Image: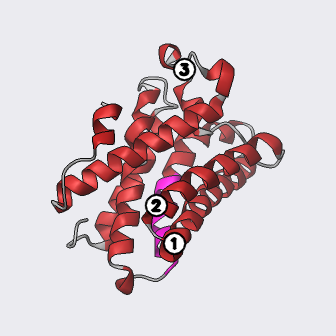
Amino acid sequence: MFPSQSRYTLVFLSIAGGVMSGLAWSGWCPGLILLFSFVPFFIIGDHIFRHRQRYTRNAFFIFLLPGFLVFSLMTLGWMRVATISGAVAVILGMTFMMSFTMWIAFIVRLWAGTVAWRVAIVAFWLTYEFATLNVNIITPWINLGNGLAGDILFIQWYEFTGTGGGTLWILLSNLVVATAVDKMISGSGRVPASMAIWV
């Protein structure tokens, strides 16, 4: 996507994705920002995939860590009031789990291509969120669908799908926007028709 991207640019993109995602829980930014907040993560994935001869298979995981650490700090930092050690454990654990989930989907991309990667991102992330709802050692607080809690007008259908429906909407939206950004920047074709539906 950006052939001249340095490692610092990739770290910056990761942090930008984490900040945008964390803003949805801030109370002063609409949760709708989540509809494009993961795009920087996908841009990193696209860059590493296109230049995979220059990166190890673990590079995507490493570049995701700063962004998901910022995201976890912004959304779970309040836990320090209860216990510092507990907050550190939860923040680091959630950072690892989110990075690992997206990295495993990236490994699928290396083996099976971009379409399989898109399906894997959605499937693995929804599985991860299902686990957070059903395993007591993981907090469901930062499930993506929860980030839309302040945007009541847009989530009336939650009574049928729960927050998982919101997460699905967020992930699909981010994939559509990331694909459109990729097409515009690389000049490899027209913006996909799905972008018109998103808008």
Q: CA distance from mark 1 to mark 3?
A: 34 Å
Q: Amino acid at mark 1?
A: Ala
Q: Is residue 111 left or right of residue 123?
A: left
Give the residue at mark 1. 112
Q: CA distance from mark 2 to mark 1?
A: 8 Å
Give the residue at mark 3. 155
Residue 159 x, y percent position in the rendering: 67, 18
Location of residue 29 with respect to 118 vertically, above or below: above
The reply to whether the C-beta atoms of the residues labelled 2 and 3 are less than 8 Å apart is no
Nearer to us of marks 1 and 3 is 1
The C terminus lies in quadrant: top left
Residue 27 x, y percent position in the rendering: 49, 24
Q: Sequence-wise, which precedes: disc 1 or disc 3?
A: 1
Q: Is residue 40 left or right of residue 180?
A: right
Q: Amino acid at mark 3?
A: Ile
Q: Which mark is residue 115?
A: 2
What residue span does the magenta drawing correspond to? 57-69
The reply to whether the C-beta atoms of the residues labelled 2 and 1 are less than 8 Å apart is yes
Q: Amino acid at mark 2?
A: Val
Q: Residue at x 67, y 22 (%)?
A: 160
